Image: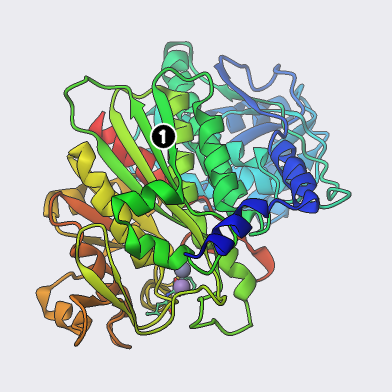
C-alpha cells in the first residue's frame, strides 16, 4: 500500500455518518421485555390479554376449559361460529371476553394431540403467532397459559424458552434510522407465563435462556440491517469493545492493518487494498471455563460491503451486500448471549472485517498474494473475497489451540441455489463436529444441512501460477469455496457454515434474521 492511500484511510469519518451512527446506536436500546413465570387462575387473573390453547377437533386445554365454563360455554360456541378448529398456527383474538377478568383473549390452535402431546414444530409455529396476532393491540402486558400444553419429548423449560426466544425478538425494530419511526401499537413490557407452582423455577430458567438468545439474535439483526456507511469495520470493532465493557470473562483485542501486515496476512489485506476504510481483525476471548480447557473458536466473515471489487457485481440488489458481514455479526451476537448467560466454557471469536471495493489501489484479477500460512493464492476473481479474508483468520486462530473451529460466512451465491433460505450449508473435516452442529441446528430450529467436502472437488482449485486459485469454476461453487478454506484448516477440527441463504431475507420482508445465532448458542450450551 502506498503512504498516500494509508493516510487517506485515516480521514474517512465524515460528520454526517457520525451523526447517523450515533442515532443507530441509540435506536437499539428499545424497551426491554420482562419475562416471568407465576401461578395464575385463568378466570380471575387480571391481564390485558390471556393466551390459551385449543387442540385440533376443538379440544380445549385446561385453561381454555375453565374460561369456557366461566362464560356459560360461549367460548366453544364462538369458536364454532368462526370456524376455528384448533389447527396449528390458527389464532383468534377476542376482545372483551365475558366471565373472566382478562381484557382480551387470544386463542391459539396447536394441532392434534398424540398421547396427550403436540409436536415441537407445532408448538413453535403456534407460539410464533402470539406476537403476530397482538401487533395491532396496545397491550403492554400479557399472560400466557401455555405451560399446560405438553410437547412431545420436551419439558416446561423448553416451552418457556420458545416463548421468550420468539417474543424477545419484538425488542428489535428495524426502523431506527427513519426520522419518524413507524407507529406500532404493541409495546410489550411484561410477559407472564402461567405455571404450576412446582414448575416456576424451571420455567424461569427457560425464559431466561430464551430471552438471552433473543438478545443475541437482535444484536446480530441490528448489525446486519445497518447500512455499509455506518456499519464499517471500525464500527464493528467498537461494538465488540462495547460488549466487553465491564465484563470480567470477556476481553477484546483489535488488530490494525500494520499488525496484520507484520503477521503476513497478505490474503486478507489484498481484499482491503481498494478500501478507504481501515480493515480490522477483531479478537474476542471469553473465559468462562477452566484455564486448561481448549476453547471453541468462532471465525466470522465481516465484509461490511461487498461490491465485488474489480470483478464488480451487477447493480440489481447490490444493496444486499451490506449483509456480507452477517457471519461477523453472528459471532458478536453469540458472544452477547454468552455474556448474558455466563456459560462455563472458553470461546474465542476471530472476526476478519473490511470492505471489498474497486479503486486504483485495488487487487486485480490475476494478482498473486501470499497468505499467512505461506500458501500463495492466484486471485482470479476479486468477488471471491470471503475466502481470502477467512483463510488468514483461520491461520491466526491456530494460536489458541482450539478444540474446534467453526467459521460463519455469507460465502457463496451457489449455496443459496443449492439450499434456498431454509438450511445453512455445513462443511466439515470432522464428522463428530459436523454431527454436533447438525444436532444443535435441529434442537434450535435453526437447521444446517451437510454438504460434501470430498477430495474430488479439490482439483478445481489448481492454478498454473500459484499454490491455489481463489475460484473453482461454475460447478459446485459452495463446495469449492469450502475446499479453499479446508486448505487452511488442517491443524484443527473445523466446520464451515455458509449462511448466504439464511442470514437475511430479501424482498418486501427484507431484513437480517439473526441466524445462525440460535444454532451456535445451542452448540455451545451442549458443550458446557
Ligand atoms: N458475498 C458473496 C456471496 C453472496 C452472493 C451471498 C449473493 C449472498 C448472495 C461472495 O463474496 C461472492 O461474491 N461470491 C461469489 C463467488 C464467485 C465469484 C466464485 C459468488 O457466489 O458469486
Ligand atoms: Mn464477493
Ligand atoms: Zn462476499
Residue 510: horizontal and vertical position, in percent? 64, 64
Binning the other alpha carbons within 10 Å of mark 1 as few (below 14), some (14 to 19) or many (20 upward) gives: some
Question: With respect to residue 160, does 182 lie above or below?
Answer: below
Q: Is residue 468 left or right of residue 514?
A: left
Residue at the outermost right position: 180
Q: Position of residue 425 (x, y in %)?
A: 33, 64
Percent x, y for residue 130? 63, 42
Q: Quadrant of residue 390?
A: bottom left
Residue 252 picture quarter: top left
Residue at image coords 41%, 26% = 250
In this rendering, the count of numbered labels is 1
In this rendering, position of residue 111 left or right of residue 387: right
The C terminus appears in which quarter of the rendering? top left
When the figure is inspected, residue 499 is found, relative to residue 173, above or below; the finding is below
| Foreground residue among 13 and 130 | 13
Work out whether 311 lies above or below 49.
below
Q: Is residue 480 rendered to the left or right of residue 255?
A: left
The outermost residue toward the front is 3
Say if 451 sits above or below 80 in the image: below
Asked if residue 147 shows in the view, the reply is: no
> Would residue 304 be seen by someone viewing this image from the given angle?
yes
292 left or right of 127?
left
Q: Residue at horizontal 51%, vertical 20%? A: 195
List the residue tagged with mark 1. 150
Please state the horizontal and vertical placement of residue 332, each as a whole percent of the image.
47, 41
Front-most of residues 440 and 316: 316
Q: How is the image coloured?
A: rainbow
Amino acid at each position: 500500500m502506498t503512504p498516500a492511500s494509508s493516510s487517506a484511510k485515516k480521514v474517512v469519518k465524515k460528520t454526517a455518518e457520525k451523526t447517523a451512527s450515533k442515532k443507530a446506536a441509540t435506536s437499539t436500546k428499545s424497551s426491554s421485555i420482562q419475562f416471568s413465570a407465576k401461578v395464575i387462575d385463568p378466570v380471575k387473573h387480571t391481564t390485558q390479554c390471556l393466551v390459551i390453547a385449543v387442540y385440533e377437533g376443538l379440544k380445549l386445554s385446561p385453561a381454555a376449559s375453565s374460561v369456557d365454563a366461566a362464560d356459560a360455554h360461549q367460548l366453544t360456541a364462538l369458536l364454532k361460529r368462526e370456524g376455528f378448529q384448533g389447527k396449528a398456527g390458527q389464532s383468534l383474538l377476542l376482545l372483551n371476553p365475558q366471565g373472566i377478568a382478562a381484557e382480551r383473549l387470544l386463542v391459539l390452535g396447536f394441532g392434534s394431540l398424540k398421547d396427550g402431546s403436540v409436536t415441537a414444530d407445532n408448538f413453535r409455529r403456534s407460539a410464533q403467532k402470539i406476537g403476530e396476532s397482538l401487533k395491532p393491540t396496545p397491550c403492554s402486558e400479557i399472560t400466557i397459559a401455555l405451560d399446560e400444553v405438553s410437547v412431545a419429548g420436551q419439558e416446561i423449560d423448553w416451552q418457556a424458552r420458545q416463548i421468550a426466544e420468539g417474543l424477545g425478538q419484538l425488542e428489535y425494530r428495524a426502523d431506527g434510522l427513519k426520522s419518524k419511526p413507524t407507529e406500532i401499537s404493541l409495546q410489550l413490557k411484561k410477559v407472564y407465563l402461567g405455571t404450576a407452582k412446582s414448575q416456576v423455577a424451571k420455567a424461569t430458567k427457560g425464559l431466561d435462556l430464551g430471552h438471552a438468545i433473543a438478545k443475541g439474535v437482535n444484536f446480530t439483526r441490528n448489525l446486519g440491517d445497518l447500512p455499509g456507511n455506518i456499519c464499517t469495520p471500525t464500527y464493528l470493532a467498537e461494538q465488540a469493545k462495547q460488549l466487553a465493557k465491564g465484563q470480567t470473562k470477556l476481553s477484546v483485542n483489535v488488530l490494525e492493518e500494520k499488525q496484520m501486515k507484520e503477521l503476513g496476512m497478505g490474503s486478507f489485506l489484498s481484499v482491503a487494498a481498494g478500501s478507504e476504510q481501515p480493515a480490522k481483525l477483531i479478537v474476542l476471548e471469553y473465559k468462562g471455563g477452566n484455564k486448561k480447557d481448549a476453547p471453541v473458536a468462532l471465525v466470522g466473515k465481516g465484509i461490511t460491503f461487498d461490491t465485488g471489487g474489480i470483478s464488480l457485481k451487477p447493480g440489481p440488489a447490490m444493496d444486499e451486500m451490506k449483509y456480507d458481514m452477517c457471519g461477523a455479526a453472528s459471532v458478536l451476537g453469540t458472544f452477547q448471549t454468552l455474556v448474558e448467560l455466563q456459560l462455563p466454557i472458553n470461546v474465542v471469536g476471530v472476526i476478519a472485517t473490511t470492505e471489498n471495493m474497486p479503486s486504483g489501489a485495488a487487487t486485480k484479477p490475476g494478482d498473486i498474494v501470499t497468505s499467512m500460512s505461506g500458501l500463495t493464492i492466484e486471485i482470479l476473481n476479486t468477488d471471491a473475497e470471503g475466502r481470502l479474508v477467512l483463510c488468514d483468520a483461520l491461520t491466526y486462530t491456530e494460536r489458541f489451540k482450539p478444540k474446534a473451529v467453526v467459521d460463519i460466512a455469507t460465502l457463496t451465491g451457489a449455496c443459496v441455489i443449492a439450499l434456498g433460505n431454509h438450511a445453512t450449508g455445513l462443511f466439515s473435516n470432522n464428522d463428530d463436529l459436523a454431527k454436533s452442529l447438525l444436532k444443535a441446528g435441529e434442537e434450535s430450529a435453526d437447521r444446517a444441512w451437510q454438504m460434501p467436502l470430498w477430495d474430488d472437488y479439490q482439483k478445481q482449485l489448481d492454478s498454473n501460477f500459484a499454490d491455489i486459485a481463489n475460484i473453482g469454476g461454475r460447478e459446485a461453487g459452495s463446495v469449492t469455496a469450502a475446499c479453499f478454506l479446508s486448505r487452511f484448516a488442517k491443524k484443527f477440527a473445523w466446520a464451515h457454515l455458509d449462511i448466504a441463504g439464511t442470514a437475511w431475507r430479501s424482498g418486501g420482508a427484507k431484513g437480517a434474521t439473526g441466524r445462525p445465532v440460535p444454532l451456535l448458542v445451542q452448540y455451545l450450551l451442549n458443550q458446557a
